[in-house]
Image (spheres, coloured by chain):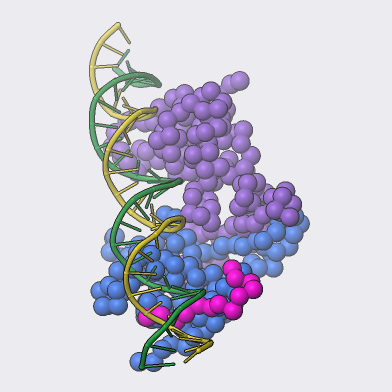
Chain colours: A blue, B purple, C green, D yellow
Amino acid sequence: MTTPAIITHSMNIMMMVTRTKLFPMTSVGIRSTKQRTAVSAALNELEDFRSTQEIHEYLKERGDSVGLTTVYRTLQALSAAGEVDVILREDGESVYRLCSDAHHHHLVCRQCGHTVEVEGPTVERWADSVSAEHGFTDVSHTLEIFGLCANCSAVSH
Amino acid sequence: MTTPAIITHSMNIMMMVTRTKLFPMTSVGIRSTKQRTAVSAALNELEDFRSTQEIHEYLKERGDSVGLTTVYRTLQALSAAGEVDVILREDGESVYRLCSDAHHHHLVCRQCGHTVEVEGPTVERWADSVSAEHGFTDVSHTLEIFGLCANCSAVSH
DNA sequence: AACGAACTTGACACTCATTTTCATTTAGAG
DNA sequence: CTCTAAATGAAAATGAGTGTCAAGTTCGTT
């Protein structure tokens, strides 16, 4: 198996971010390591939103054990770079998933994490105009749906 | 100052919830205590979304000291009863606020908690139909905007 | 191919929100 | 007034996420 394209892509973006925000005047960059490759590979294989701990566990079982701290850092870097989607589960835990580039929202099972990308109202424009009206800057927004998927609904009668 | 109507209302709803979900066959109920009164009073006075700890602190300074555990429990009960709005801040901390009954969303300052209720797309219908299409049950959704309010934007240049 | 500076890793200690436990207190029905 | 379930709160526990720092790696340079 070859290195997924996302790795290279991620690394490029991460390097840009690093150069721009953290080390403006240096020519340093980020490096490609087997740990980062492993985390990206896991994201490619996992279909649903997963917590850092779950991804860490998955990697361990898979044989590509990576330190928990490193998994935290890598997932944060990837989400900061826009490479993965993050959402806050209802219990406040962050969960990550590799998503399509297209505009979409999520229908997430709060039991098993099963995720469906769904079409929905484009809230970007609305959020921007409402924010501007009230003088808010640096805005972000959330629009997600949580519930019990068909499977989990059936299990709990 | 008389006991705010919300207290009685909350207690009624809480009693219903309790009876229905927790103690179906008994005639037990919840009780009106000065701690619960104090928490509700605080919510009436505070305009913005506040964390449990902040509300606990507010009560302490105010003289109506209430145990932190009790504040946690009361806020959870009130939000479960639909008496207060809860949202998850971007850092995963839950914040509470007494809101209008009307349908609305929130524009929340991630720095100071300042909140503006805003009109927005009615996502209930959309969420329900999308969920149904995919067999999801017991759904809930979030649609909030976070940013820096005019004040906080100014402070940080 | 070796070198070395900067970057990365990971074990561990730590922070901090929230929950659990449990002994004590209190509301409110009878 | 009495009794009991409900409620409180102090303290300990839990658990996600972060900070630290010594040791390990990457990769451009020699």
| Residue B62 x, y percent position in the rendering | 56, 26
| Residue B120 x, y percent position in the rendering | 66, 59
Residue sitting nearer the eye, D7 or A7: A7
Query: Position of D13 compared to A140: left or right?
Result: left
**Which region of the structure is painted magenta?**
A22-34
Whether residue A47 is visible here, answered yes or no, is: no
Residue drawn at the location 41% of the way across and 77% of the way down: A36
Please, is residue A137 above or below residue B37 in the view? below
Residue drawn at the location 59% of the way across and 79% of the way down: A27
| Residue A121 x, y percent position in the rendering | 61, 69
Residue sitting nearer the eye, A48 or A59: A59
- Is the N terminus of chain B in the top left, top right, bottom left or bottom right quadrant? top right
| Residue B6 located within the stretch drawn in magenta | no
| Residue A26 located within the stretch drawn in magenta | yes
Residue sitting nearer the eye, B7 or B92: B92
Residue drawn at the location 57% of the way across and 73% of the way down: A18
Whether residue B70 is visible here, answered yes or no, is: yes
Considering the whole magenta stretch, tell me its main secondary structure.
loop
